[in-house]
Amino acid sequence: MTVDIDKTTGPADTPPAGPEAIKAIPVRHYGRYVSAVVALALLGGIVYAFSQGKINWGTIPDYFFDDRILSGVGKTLLLTVLAMAIGIVGGILLAVMRLSKNPVTSSIAWFYIWFFRGTPVLVQLIVWFNLGLVFEYINLGPFYKDEWSDFMTPFLTALLGLGLNEAAYMAEICRAGLLSVDEGQTEASHALGMSHAKTLRRIVVPQAMRVIVPPTGNEVINMLKTTSLVSVVQYPELLRAAQDIGQTSGAPAEMLFLAAAWYLLLTSVFSIGQYYLERYYAKGSTRQLPPTPWQKVKANMLSLGRPKGGMA
Amino acid sequence: MSEKLVESDAPVKGSAVPMVKAEGVHKSFGPVEVLKGIDLEVRTGEVFCLIGPSGSGKSTFLRCINHLEKINAGRLYVDGELVGYRQKGDKLYELKDSEVALKRRDIGMVFQRFNLFPHMTAVENVMEAPVQVKGASKAQARERAMQLLERVGLGDKAGNYPSQLSGGQQQRVAIARALAMDPKLMLFDEPTSALDPELVGDVLDVMRDLAESGMTMVVVTHEMGFAREVGDSLVFMDGGVVVESGDPRQVLTDPQHERTKSFLSKVL
């Protein structure tokens, strides 16, 4: 970190030696002021319209930290994390299968991805929900035996529906990552006598991570929002909880705004997390300087009063 | 770098079983026939140089020796054993991946583009195979890796990542990495072609030391000076066949074949 400070303060404070520094009048961007005013006016108009609508805004803060809402938030987060875990593990497996020399495994992976990517998640969720029509019982020999409807709880339906669908998408992301690693790496590893499995685990996957991580962060944020779909299978996550309150309290639209606010809040937190995760993996890559965090740039600009050498 | 690179068992040059023996080796990529019947012998302990224009099949042949490429016809032996197959009676059986991997342990390979593992430091690159393949302890492997890096003149760069090394340094790490498996045969695929002219010398010095230590080496190269000075045998390939072979000093100074003459007149 000390290196960063040296680099930012060092060259900027020393004026260029030699010929007189240029003092020119910068180009004026009048269009920017005009467009900013127009945008603000439009925003103001929209906010005013909403504030005058038949929406009782006062109910939102009343219910914002309601127990049912908080439990819904918790369930949404739990579902997001577990479904993504299934998606990532399944995705890596499918990607490796897809790239395998074995025609059976690669065909299975191809078929899986074809099916789960080719049908809407909502439809898949409903199909999982109605699978009791096909299977009456579940019988895993001596380990587990139950009626299907008791086994397939709304939570499990939601988890499998989202996780298995996600695996198909993660498979393509992982495959792109694995393919991005130079073939010479595999050759060098094989030439040293390393097996396929070791080559993959020790050499290829660590290098593929750099390509896999950013879109995976994207998928997490997508998943967080997609969990709202599982309200159709009676799982009381955030949207479902908000809708339930809306029906009993007589403020259905207000509760939807409340849910939207929560989703926005959660995705914002995840976005920040993604930013730092990417930064972490960038450190291991060939880039010599990790990108400085946004806050740091901001702090720098504020502390200096005027941004030096503004590139805008 | 007066110290020998490898404590070899001092193999006798030209001992009975050749290290590499090719009999009518053919290799096609789809409809393109790259090798059209290669016959040659690399004796144990010798430095065997392969020269020729690009597309002549010399790199492909080198890659066949450690079975990175499968041959389509002919027979290829390393140290008396068939490469990639097992012969029972008059039938050939393909070797399992694990068996191929086992044989590759004994054959070191150095690539034109180095192919160091970029997410590992120099010393980790050298340690990787002994730890993962031979099951050596990390401490042991590190000690040996440091010795090897020392000997290729890079003891002070052990903690650097490949991206922090010059091309010549990367290639020397790559040589150390291959040597860490104690191979009986080293394959060099144009090891200096991707280097700045200034850096070529360091890599050739390491290779020269290695040759003096008695290592059997098959070298695909455009460095005629190295071939003349260090090589024990030389083969000129063109269009997938061996055009001319013999003592490097003789072939390079007094080529018999027309094609060899025109090639050498352009590169020398």
Image (cartoon, coloured by chain):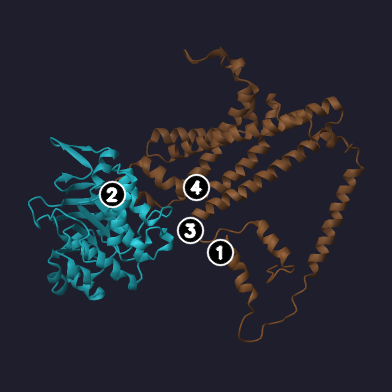
Chain colours: A brown, B cyan
Whether discs 3 and 2 lie on one chain: the answer is no
Whether discs 3 and 4 lie on one chain: the answer is yes
Q: Which residue is mark 4?
A: A209
Is the Cβ of the residue at disc 1 closer than 8 Å to that at disc 4? Answer: no
Q: Nearer the viewer, mark 1 or mark 3?
A: 1
Residue drawn where x is 51% and y is 61% of the image: A288
Residue drawn where x is 25% and y is 69% of the image: B223
Which quadrant would residue B14 be assigned to in this image? Answer: bottom left
Q: Which residue is mark 2?
A: B69
Position in image of residue B210 (x %, y %):
21, 61
Q: Who comes first in sequence, dot 3 or dot 4?
A: 4
- Asked if A266 appears above or below A211 in the picture, the reply is above
Q: Residues within 10 Å of mark 3 (few under 14, many from 20)?
A: some
Quick check: B222 left or right of A155? left
Is the Cβ of the residue at disc 4 closer than 8 Å to that at disc 2? Answer: no
Q: Is residue B194 visible?
A: no
Using the numbered discs, state the Cα–Cα distance from disc 1 to disc 3 in whole angstroms: 18 Å
Q: Residues within 10 Å of mark 4 (few under 14, many from 20)?
A: some
Q: Amino acid at mark 2?
A: Glu
Position in image of residue B236 (x %, y %):
19, 64
Which residue occupies the foreground of this view, A129 or B44?
B44
Q: Which residue is mark 3?
A: A286
In which quadrant is the C terminus of chain B drawn? bottom left
Position in image of residue A287 (x %, y %):
51, 59
Q: Who comes first in sequence, dot 1 or dot 4?
A: 1
Position in image of residue B35 (x %, y %):
23, 55
Using the numbered discs, state the Cα–Cα distance from disc 1 to disc 4 in whole angstroms: 27 Å
Q: Which residue is mark 1?
A: A3
Which quadrant would residue A147 be assigned to in this image? Answer: top right
Task: State which chain disc 3 sits on.
Answer: A
Q: Secondary structure at mark 2?
A: loop
Quick check: B140 left or right of A270? left
